[in-house]
Amino acid sequence: MQYLIIVISAILVNNIVLAQFLGICPFLGVSKNSSTAMGMAAAVAFVMTLSTIVTYLIQYYILDPLHVSYLQTISFILVIAALVQLVEIILKKVSPALYQALGVYLPLITTNCTILGVAILTITRQFNLIESVVFAIATAGGFGLALLIFANIREQMEFSNIPEGLKGTPIALITAGILAMAFMGFSGIV
Amino acid sequence: MNRMQTFLNGLMKENPIFVIMLGMCPTLGVSSNAINGIGMGLATTFVLVMSNLIVSLVAGYIPDKVRIPSYVVIIATFVTVVQLTMQAWLPSLYASLGLFIPLIVVNCIVLGRAEAFACKNGAVLSILDGLGMGFGFTFALTLLGSIRELLGTGKVFDLVIYPEQYGSLLFVLAPGAFIVLGYLIAIINRIKKT
């Protein structure tokens, strides 16, 4: 039951992009068509789950016993940067097409605040290891859901007549605002 | 480029939020009122200036392949300094900015300036660039925060402009952030064109 609450809360109620404002850059950047959006969401999900497990172990088995938890920010970001490199190497080998499509955004996962954000959130909320993993996967799912909905809306918007000044980022932001409003409807659930 | 130009560049022509659109997450996340906007802006400015300075000094000694991780460590060090300082002296601001303070590490502006400017320029120019970008960021955050606070609660910097019950809470909540920033950028695009 507690896992169900974590999942629903992370995907719908406290959606990482639309309610907590993390990962806005990839949200605006790779949402121009739905297949790149899917690729990005998959890459984020993979990195996020792995990094949450690793940072959890680092926090409770290295930083806490040595009383150096003020090094949290530095050590977490280094671990995440190394993991992203790893994913990049694997993806280059396994799926060159996807690697081409994600282009500049893959190295940018390092500076994607969702990854570091989730790693820190699991520590501040004092989840245990299983809860952390569930939380990471659900958050990545929420990110993917928001990204996919948004990419589809933007694909549709290609055909609509938008006032000159609003073209590009402004209309994307306003659309995201309305999407966030829709997600606020879930706020009573948990 | 002379020094004044470098400083003004970040403030106006290449404003990180309104023009090059980096660092959107803290912009939207902490701009629910003007005070938070200024606090976040100044914290980021400090990190920007210090990391630009150190990166410009050590850039020549770092091998090309490991430069990104090295810059990240430099940035993370200053973020930890800000985090501990704020926790000690400004606990209420620290509480309301919350998660976004450690997340300055992954703010694209900071790494972006280290990579695009500081590693190719001298110490003085890099400090000026950091200050310009930082103040540009602070200005954008404060403007966004003030508008949201005014529309949402009828106050700016806790100064009552009109009674609170006429405000629309929506602008303080998440959707308001997206919508206000969207219209602000649209207005700025329009001004730039004429």
Image (spheres, coloured by chain):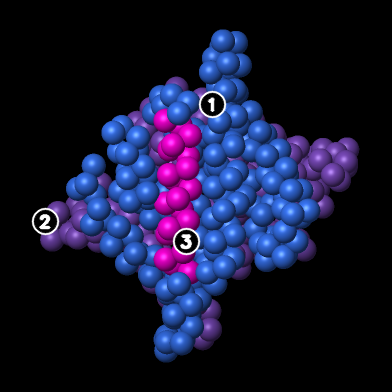
Residue in front for this viewpoint, A43 or A70: A43
In this rendering, the answer to whether B52 lies above or below A23 is: above
Q: What element carries label 3?
A: helix
User: Which chain, by letter, is purple?
Assistant: B
Within 10 Å of disc 2 (Cα), the crowding (few <14, some 14-19, many 20+) is few
Q: Is mark 2 on a helix, strand or loop?
A: helix
Labelled disc at residue A147: 3
Q: Can marks 3 and 1 be said to lie on one chain? A: yes
Report the magenta residues as a range. A131-151
Disc 2 from disc 1: Cα separation: 45 Å
The residue under the point 84% across, 44% down is B65
Residue B10 position in % (x across, y down): 61, 59
Q: Please identify which colour was used for chain A in the image.
A: blue
Q: Mark 2 points at which residue?
A: B165
Disc 2 from disc 3: Cα separation: 35 Å
Within 10 Å of disc 1 (Cα), the crowding (few <14, some 14-19, many 20+) is many
